[in-house]
Image (cartoon, rainbow, N blue to C red):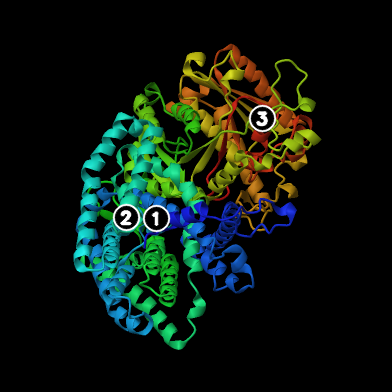
């Protein structure tokens, strides 16, 4: 039984008592690299690990497309590499997974299993059970009793048909019942997170019930192993009592000692120190060793060590982050591959065996589904919610596979029965996600209310409708003036905070601007700070998502921005979204729509550029030509052009373009290019600039530029903000005014209908309108002239509200006709940059994105600029538009705000 100590003794004997030295020659001497060598087992171990990891990752990539958990790919890897498939290839098993090499593989796999159960213990939070004990206890109890009874009943014919008489029936019945009643809590957390159910009433109940189910399940497993190893009833009782005593020792004095040590070493405030990590690892393996030698499996001791680690300050999450990568990449696939190597589906070779297999699968699902569904319905949930709870609790995954492997190693399960139960675990885990998607679609979900008791809730659809209805009245009141007061600020990195705080402060109207008539903008500015966290495959990400209700108050980015709002008299509310990369943009659009946001603020730090020698500017103090640093050393050796498309900025641009395409509100992208170390005369902080900003808007026309103009007017209501607005027209090509052209190399295509299309050859959406008709051109030209005349040449100030009246005196208006508008724009920006530097203020460029219904096509001129100054990633150019790209490619150090009007149709 001793999974951990047995292989150690075997390896010690093989090492100490070998008779002769093994040949030390390698591949060059003609030696087979896959030949097993007791003195150097590392070679074959590396071969085994490489094959296992590559196969597991390839299967995981395929199964991820259908939203299946990674454990399925790991078990399927073992089945494919085992006797079911590759094991039937002559010589494969003897060379790759020989019997002599398995103890070494098994030792590493069991060490990894102890580490994994330690992480499972870290993941379990008893506070979740306490908060929702009333409802979750009923579901958890029903989800264990009924399946356990069905498993015990099915064990009678299974025992007589497939199990040797030397195995005690009570031991087999107990293992069967535990395997039926267990729920895979780690896999359940992953499914709840990916399906965005953690903040629903269903998700909370399932999470709480899963925690309780897991604790009881591991306790039953420890009891089962104690009965198997104890033999006589008295010895089993002694083993059980010693195990209970060890558990109480860890839970009470051990937990408080570990908490004292964490506080004494500062591990709670600053993360675990090296000394605290050392003590924790010693506790982990010491507890595993103790439970192993007393007759209970080592994994139970590792699980207990994880439970007693303090949760204060997110210490358990930090510990998980330090251990999870090695466990999930190497150790865990090894264990489940060993499980698959023991699974031979070829043993299911007759009708009776398949009949029992179907019965095992049917009763396992029926027991869990029926018990949890009826308990949830009895607690007051609807049938739809109850059935969803039953489907989620039916998830088996890796926990049942661990139980089955323990039973197989103890000799309680035969290889045939083991294969039958492995197939059942895989099938039920595979069914969970599609069943939940079918039973509980997003429009039917009920989410927890932000206030009140845990289950004082409203339906998603009703909530969205109520918010839309309540917001529609406010928007109608403000329709006469374009000022925006409801913003959604996206925060995903700490370096994005300065830019977002600076921009948000500019949008806060000063009290004197509102003193004349506070109904001009309805109310003070309201900001929703949305914290985006990408959901990765790591366990720590799942732990953070399951603790979203507390993380929203402890997240440092939200805390800083919340404090910033309080200091500036700004109403700031916060929200948190932990979703996969593909769902980041849709989460932004969803939150903005739910809160009635009028403008979404996106941050973006551009890539770090370095001027190449051939593009260095000969003019002193001229802006440095942006050139992305080559990431490949061979590029500098052979003087090849760097490929900026592989930068992190290009990856972020995909997310930004998704937001542009999906948002129903206006979007402002803030490209923060402030570099204080390169501008000693001008500081971006308030101490260097006096808090003054000067805006520069190149106006070409179109819905995005009109939005930018309104945005500039609103910002200039602040007494420390001034602006220069220049209307540029192309002098030598008047007939191409409003012509819609686009470069085929960019991969965008216009639709034939006059409607919004979302297309991209790179697989990411972009926002463009169809071919403009004569009517839409006239409408757009009229709208441009009207808004320009309204603000640039007003007939009188009496028609303006207090915001416009305060802003217009601070704005300079110019009109320029030039054959090279982009070069003229860049030159004017450089002049303003020098002027603002002398006045100790900062320059902020505001531009329309103009990827749809653009007045001028700047592609040819932008191409000439890139040939002169250096290249720019096509993804970046598509994201910010041609005008903003001209500033970036020519090395402008001013920050840029790129605006896109809401995708509600043609203006």
> Left of 578 or right of it: where is 622?
right
Q: Nearer the viewer, residue 658 or 396?
A: 396
> Left of 315 or right of it: where is 21?
right
**Between discs 1 and 3, the one toward the N terminus:** 1
Rendered image quadrant of residue 271: top left
**Above or below for 531 versus 566:** below
Rendered image quadrant of residue 523: top left
The image shows a total of numbered marks equal to 3
Q: CA distance from mark 1 to mark 3?
A: 56 Å
**Between discs 2 and 3, the one toward the N terminus:** 2
Q: Which mark is residue 293?
A: 2
In x, y percent, where is residue 537? 48, 51
What residue sits right under mark 1 in the picture?
Answer: 5
In x, y percent, where is residue 623? 69, 22
* Labels 1 and 3 touching (C-beta < 8 A): no
Q: Nearer the viewer, residue 767 or 316?
A: 316
**Above or below for 774 versus 498:** below
Q: Nearer the viewer, residue 796 or 692?
A: 692
* Labels 2 and 3 touching (C-beta < 8 A): no
């Amino acid at each position: 039984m001793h999974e951990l100590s047995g292989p150690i003794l075997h390896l010690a004997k093989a090492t100490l008592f070998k008779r002769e030295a093994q040949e030390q020659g390698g591949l060059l001497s003609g030696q087979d690299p896959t030949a097993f060598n007791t003195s150097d087992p590392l070679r074959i171990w590396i071969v085994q690990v490489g094959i296992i990891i590559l196969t597991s990752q390839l299967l995981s990539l395929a199964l991820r497309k259908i939203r299946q958990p990674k454990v399925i790919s790991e078990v399927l890897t073992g089945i494919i590499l085992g006797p079911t498939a590759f094991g039937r290839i002559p010589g494969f098993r003897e060379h790759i997974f020989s019997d002599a090499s398995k103890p070494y593989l098994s030792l590493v796999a069991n060490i990894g299993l102890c580490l994994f159960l330690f992480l499972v213990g870290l993941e379990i939070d008893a506070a979740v059970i306490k908060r929702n004990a009333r409802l979750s206890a009923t579901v958890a109890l029903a989800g264990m009793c009924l399946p356990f009874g069905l498993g015990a009943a099915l064990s009678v014919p299974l025992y007589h048909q497939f199990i040797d008489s030397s195995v005690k029936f009570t031991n087999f019945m107990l293992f069967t019942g535990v395997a039926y009643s267990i729920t895979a809590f780690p896999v359940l957390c992953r499914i709840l997170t990916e399906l965005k159910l953690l903040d629903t009433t269903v998700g909370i109940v399932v999470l709480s019930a899963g925690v309780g189910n897991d604790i009881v399940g591991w306790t039953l497993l420890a009891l089962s192993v104690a009965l198997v190893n104890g033999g006589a009833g008295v010895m089993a009782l002694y083993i059980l009592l010693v195990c209970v005593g060890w558990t109480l020792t860890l839970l009470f004095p051990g937990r408080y000692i570990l908490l004292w040590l964490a506080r004494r070493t500062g591990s709670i405030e600053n993360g675990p120190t090296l000394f605290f990590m050392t003590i924790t690892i010693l506790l982990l393996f010491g507890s595993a060793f103790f439970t192993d030698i007393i007759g209970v499996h080592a994994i139970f001791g590792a699980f207990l060590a994880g439970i007693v680690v303090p949760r204060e300050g997110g210490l358990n999450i930090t510990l998980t982050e330090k251990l999870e990568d090695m466990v999930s990449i190497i150790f865990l696939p090894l264990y489940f591959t060993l499980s698959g190597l023991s699974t031979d589906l070829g043993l299911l070779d007759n009708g009776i065996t398949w009949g029992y297999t179907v019965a095992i699968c049917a009763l396992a699902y029926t027991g869990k589904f029926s018990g949890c569904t009826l308990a949830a319905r009895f607690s007051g949930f609807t049938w739809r919610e109850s059935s969803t709870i039953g489907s989620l609790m039916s998830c088996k995954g890796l926990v049942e596979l661990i139980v089955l492997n323990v039973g197989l190693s103890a000799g309680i399960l035969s290889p045939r029965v083991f294969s039958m139960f492995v197939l059942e675990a895989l099938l039920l885990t595979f069914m969970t996600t599609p069943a939940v998607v079918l039973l509980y679609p997003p429009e039917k979900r009920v989410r927890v209310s932000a206030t009140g008791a845990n289950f004082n809730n409203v339906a998603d659809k009703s909530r969205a409708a109520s918010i839309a209805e309540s917001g529609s009245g406010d928007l109608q009141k403000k329709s006469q003036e374009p000022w925006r007061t409801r913003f959604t600020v996206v925060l995903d990195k700490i370096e994005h905070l300065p830019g977002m705080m600076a921009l948000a402060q500019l949008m806060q109207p000063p009290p004197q601007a509102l003193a004349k008539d506070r109904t001009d903008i309805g109310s003070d500015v309201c900001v929703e700070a949305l914290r985006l966290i990408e959901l990765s495959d790591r366990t720590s990400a799942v732990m953070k998502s399951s603790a979203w209700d507390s993380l929203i108050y402890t997240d440092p980015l939200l805390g800083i921005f919340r404090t910033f709002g309080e200091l500036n008299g700004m109403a700031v509310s916060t929200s948190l979204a932990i979703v996969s990369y593909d769902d980041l943009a849709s989460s932004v659009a969803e939150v903005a729509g739910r809160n009635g946001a009028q403008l979404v603020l996106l941050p973006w730090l551009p890539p770090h550029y370095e001027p190449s020698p051939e593009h260095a500017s000969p003019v002193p103090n001229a802006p440095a030509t942006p050139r992305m640093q080559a990431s490949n050393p061979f590029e500098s050796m052979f003087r090849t052009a760097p490929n900026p498309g592989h930068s992190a900025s290009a990856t972020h641009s995909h997310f930004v373009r998704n937001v542009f395409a999906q948002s129903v509100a206006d979007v402002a992208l803030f490209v923060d290019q402030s570099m204080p170390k390169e501008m000693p005369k001008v500081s971006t902080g308030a101490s260097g600039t006096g808090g003054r900003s000067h805006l520069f808007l190149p106006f070409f026309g179109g819905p995005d530029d009109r939005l930018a103009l309104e945005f500039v007017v609103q910002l200039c209501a602040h007494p420390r903000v001034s602006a220069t607005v220049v209307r540029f027209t192309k002098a030598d090509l008047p007939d191409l005014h409003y012509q819609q052209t686009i470069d085929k190399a960019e991969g965008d295509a216009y639709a034939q209908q006059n409607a919004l299309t979302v297309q991209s050859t790179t697989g990411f959406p972009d926002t463009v309108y169809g071919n403009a008709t004569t009517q839409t051109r006239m409408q757009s030209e009229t709208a441009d002239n009207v808004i320009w005349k309204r603000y640039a040449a007003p007939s009188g100030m009496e028609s303006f509200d207090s915001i416009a009246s305060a802003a217009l005196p601070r704005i300079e208006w110019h009109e320029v006709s030039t054959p090279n508008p982009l070069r003229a724009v860049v030159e004017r920006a450089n002049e303003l940059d020098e002027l603002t530097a002398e006045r100790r203020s900062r320059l902020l460029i505001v531009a329309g994105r103009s990827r749809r219904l653009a007045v001028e096509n700047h592609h040819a001129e932008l191409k000439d600029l890139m040939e002169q100054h250096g290249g720019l990633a096509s993804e970046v150019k598509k994201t910010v538009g041609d005008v903003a790209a001209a500033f970036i490619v020519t090395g402008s150090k001013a920050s840029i705000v790129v605006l896109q009007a809401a995708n509600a149709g043609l203006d």
